[in-house]
Image (cartoon, grey):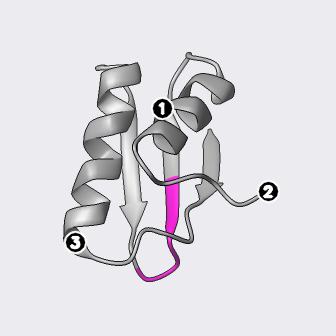
């Protein structure tokens, strides 16, 4: 399970974009977005850095 904190995810549109971005990395991934805590949990066999890079490019860089 990959867990990322996305401080720039502030609304429903952001959450939708985050989920879609994760699905572009791995279409079979299970993605759980929690807007209240600004967390995304991703169940995937893909590398964590692939998701970090894609989310950063989409404008939602994970907090360190």
- Where does the image place residue 52, in percent across and percent down from the top left? 60, 37
| SS assignment at label 1 | helix
x and y percentages locating residue 20 in the rendered image: 25, 39
Is-magenta flag for residue 39? yes
Q: Secondary structure at mark 3?
A: helix
- Proximity of marks 3 and 1: CB atoms separated by less than 8 Å: no
Which residue is drawn at the image coordinates 33% and 36% (left, top)? 21
Q: Earlier in the sequence, mark 3 or mark 1?
A: 3
Label 2 residue SS: loop
Q: Which residues are magenta?
A: 36-40
The quarter of the picture where residue 30 lies is top left
The residue that appears at 63% across and 54% down in the rendered structure is 62
Q: Position of residue 17 (x, y in %)?
A: 26, 50
Q: Is residue 40 left or right of residue 21?
A: right
53 or 1, nearer to the observer: 53
Please give the residue where the numbered disc 3 appears in the rendered image: 12
* Residue placed under numbered mark 2 in the picture: 64
| Majority secondary structure in the magenta region | loop
**Labels 2 and 1: the sequence-earlier one:** 1
Are there few (<14), some (14-19), or many (20+) residues within 10 Å of tag 1?
some
Residue at the spot 48% in from the left edge and 42% down from the top edge = 55
Residue labelled with disc 1: 54
Mark 2 vs 3, N-terminal side: 3
Residue 22 belongs to the span the image colors magenta: no
The 10 Å Cα crowd at callout 3, few under 14, some 14 to 19, many 20 or more, is few
Q: Residue 1's mark? A: none
Image quarter where the N terminus lies is top right
The front one of 13 and 19 is 13
Residue at the spot 47% in from the left edge and 37% down from the top edge? 57
Cα distance between the residues tagged 2 and 3: 23 Å
Q: Is residue 23 left or right of residue 12?
A: right
45 horizontally vs 18: left or right: right
């Amino acid at each position: 399970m990959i867990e990322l904190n996305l401080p720039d995810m502030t609304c429903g549109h952001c959450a939708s974009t985050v989920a879609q971005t994760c699905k572009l990395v791995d279409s079979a991934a299970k993605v759980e977005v929690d807007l209240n805590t600004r967390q995304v949990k991703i169940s995937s066999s893909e590398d964590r850095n692939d998701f970090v890079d894609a989310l950063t490019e989409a404008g939602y860089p994970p907090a360190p």
